[in-house]
Amino acid sequence: MKTTLAEALPPMIPEYPVEIAGHHLTLRFDVNINKTKKGVKLQFVMKDIPQDPRQAQQMANEIGTELQEKFGAADMQVIYDVENPYKNVIGFLLPLPSLADYIIKHVLKGEGEGQMVPKEPAQSEEEAPTEELPAQETPPSPEDQVREIVMNRAGLK
């Protein structure tokens, strides 16, 4: 498994030197591959990884506070990425609906609210589900939970 972001990413990802919350970092942009959290990743790459995880968390809090202020002023949302697998990265996500609303309102000068349209895979009549959906949601089995964790950590989800 890759231990740092530099080992895992190809060189075509845009990156910029930035100063945020008093820290000099490299900001890389990427897209989130998790279909339930579509958006643009903001990956703040640290040159030196703090030995104490509390220091990294304090940095994340400081960066998050500044990002919340700046993106909030632009009527955008930014979310801390709790599933970031890289030791040298403090990650945030700019959700796709937030980015889309900003582009419509401020770039294209459109009006109205967007609609969240679930994207459903195309199904033939043969593949159509035959059983009804349950009346209420059931929690995942322990096997499904373990599979989800393994897939997340392996970067497959």
Image (spheres, rainbow, N blue to C red):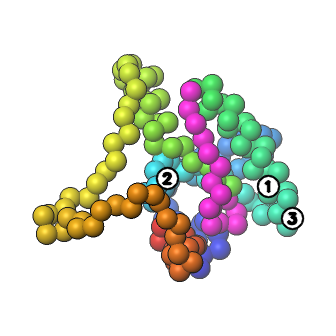
Residue at the image point whose x is 36% and y is 34% from the top: 115
Image quadrant containing the N terminus: bottom right
> For the image shown, how many numbered marks are present on the structure?
3
Q: Is residue 43 magenta?
A: no
- The label nearer to you, 2 versus 1, is 2
Residue positioned most to the left: 125
Disc 2 designates what residue?
A: 37
Of the pair 142 and 80, the residue shown nearer to us: 142
Amino acid type for the residue under numbered disc 2: Lys
* Residue 104 appears left or right of 155: left
Residue at the image point whose x is 38% and y is 21% from the top: 112
Amino acid type for the residue under numbered disc 3: Asp
Disc 3 designates what residue?
A: 52
* Residue 12 appears left or right of 75: left
Amino acid type for the residue under numbered disc 1: Gln
Q: Which residues are magenta?
A: 75-89
